Image (tube, rainbow, N blue to C red):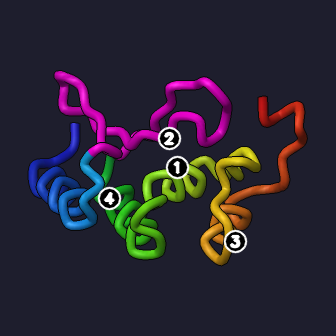
Amino acid sequence: MMHEPDLATLLRLVAKHDQREDLWWNQDLEFTVDCSDVFHWACADAEPVETLKDVIDLSVAYDETPLFGAALYAARRRRMRPQDPAIPEGPVGDLFRACGPERTKEDQG
């Protein structure tokens, strides 16, 4: 479980960027960010946020792209490029393409 000060930092972060819907948690207060349909179609998926380093990495991603910060955090943490249709247009897309090698059509599901 995340330490209370780190948890407070995480909650303030998602509130600051008004992205509360990105954050999921369970009864044990284990936190994840939603990345459903980012890496594979029709797939409920989430990436853990477990440490202060994870919170900082998520903060950097939100600063770079508030709308897609959770997905960018997940892609960087997995070192995996999202499926092509999930990559935003323009310069933000370059951030996602830098997360991992190009994926084959078969790998994108």
Relative to 106, 12 lies left or right: left
Report the Cα–Cα distance between label 3 and label 4.
Answer: 22 Å
- Judge depth for marks 4 and 1 and give the one in front: 1
- Amino acid at the residue labelled 4: Val
Q: Which residue is drawn at 81% across and 55% down?
A: 101
User: Going by the image, does 8 lie left or right of 103?
Assistant: left
For label 1, the residue is 74
Crowd class of label 2 (few under 14; some 14 to 19; many from 20; radius 10 Å): many
Residue nearer the viewer, 97 or 66: 66
Between marks 3 and 4 in the image, the one whose residue lies nearer the viewer:
3
Coordinates of residue 60 in the picture (x, y in percent): 41, 71
The label number, if any, that marks residue 94 in the structure image? 3
Q: How far apart are marks 2 and 3 (CA)?
A: 18 Å
Q: For mark 1, give the secondary structure.
A: helix
Residue designated by label 4: 55
Residue type indicated by callout 2: Cys
The three-letter code of the residue at mark 1 reads Ala
Query: Could you tell which of marks 3 and 4 lies nearer the N-terminus?
Result: 4
* Dot in front, 2 or 1: 2
**Label total for image:** 4
Residue 14 found in image quarter: bottom left
* Residue 97, placed above or below residue 74: below
